[in-house]
Image (cartoon, helix red, strand yellow):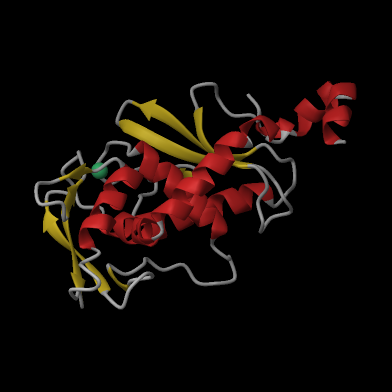
Amino acid sequence: MRRDWIVKQPHAWEATVPVIDSKWRRVELVAMDLFCGDITLALYRADEEDGPVGLVHSYSPRSEAAERAAFLAEAMRVLGGLEAVVGADARLVRFPCGTWHSLAARRLFLETAKHDPSEPLAARLLEVPDTRSEQTIRIESLGEGSYAVSADGATDETPSRAPAIAAALARLAELSLEEGGEVVAFPCGHAHDALVALLLKQAQNLRSALREEEMKASRGVLVAPSAQE
Ligand SMILES: [Zn+2]
């Protein structure tokens, strides 16, 4: 429906759409936002002189779209420990380490889009009950970007879930898995506590996290026209 309209009136559409500079590369997409009238939102990245920067942007001409994008950027800061770009657009984010964790940034963006805006934003905990066992999963920062995963309550029947969770974290965020299999490390050598806590939930259900990714990939051809570059 909308596609037809765009084809018939390309100039009218272009005039109302907030276009961004071509330096931005889209890295992740929410095709239909549940909390803001099904608008399309995307995370973009650009490499600036002082390091990589992310931008949450919507091509939707709806008046609330920019506000929604700014909220997602704020959610990425609270839930993922990202930083604002001082004195700049509220929709910009950067990693405090000055590098860019590609897979983690994408997962963080998708997770923030699922956050019900009527609920307060708060960083998640590094200690959670396991979803598959009676164990408690605990993550401890060892400094320099390394994190040890441990599990309380392992028994002979249900061995520690720590190695599986550590391996899942490594896979979900491109972390290195250290010898012994219960320590993961960010390649930048900096701490990312909030980000690890956010990814812990997905790591506990790795299969469903990966399935979601596959479904997104297979739907890639069906994204809204406003999201296409
Ligand atoms: Zn880092």
Quadrant that contains the N terminus: top right
Is residue 133 toward the left or the right of residue 179 in the image?
right
Image x and y of residue 143, in percent = 11, 54
Image x and y of residue 29, in percent = 57, 39
Q: Is residue 146 visible?
A: no
Quarter-wise, where is residue 173 in the image? top left
Quarter-wise, where is residue 100 in the image? top left
Q: Is residue 131 visible?
A: yes
In this view, the residue farthest toward the front is 157
Q: Residue at x 54, y 21 (%)?
A: 22
Against 2, is 35 above or below? below
Q: Which residue is drawn at 54% across and 51% down?
A: 70
**Residue situated in front as seen by the camera: 156 or 218:** 156
Q: Residue at x 15, y 51 (%)?
A: 181
Quadrant that contains the C terminus: top right
Q: Which residue is drawn at 32% across and 39% down?
A: 101
Image x and y of residue 35, in percent = 66, 59
Against 131, is 45 above or below? above
Against 122, is 10 above or below? above
Against 121, is 217 above or below? above
Question: Which corner quadrant of the figure contains ligand 1?
Answer: top left
Q: How many labels sit on residues?
A: 0
Is residue 24 toward the left or the right of residue 125 in the image?
right
**Residue situated in front as seen by the camera: 86 or 160:** 160
**Residue situated in front as seen by the camera: 115 or 82:** 115
Is residue 3 toward the left or the right of residue 60 in the image?
right
Image x and y of residue 126, in percent = 27, 67
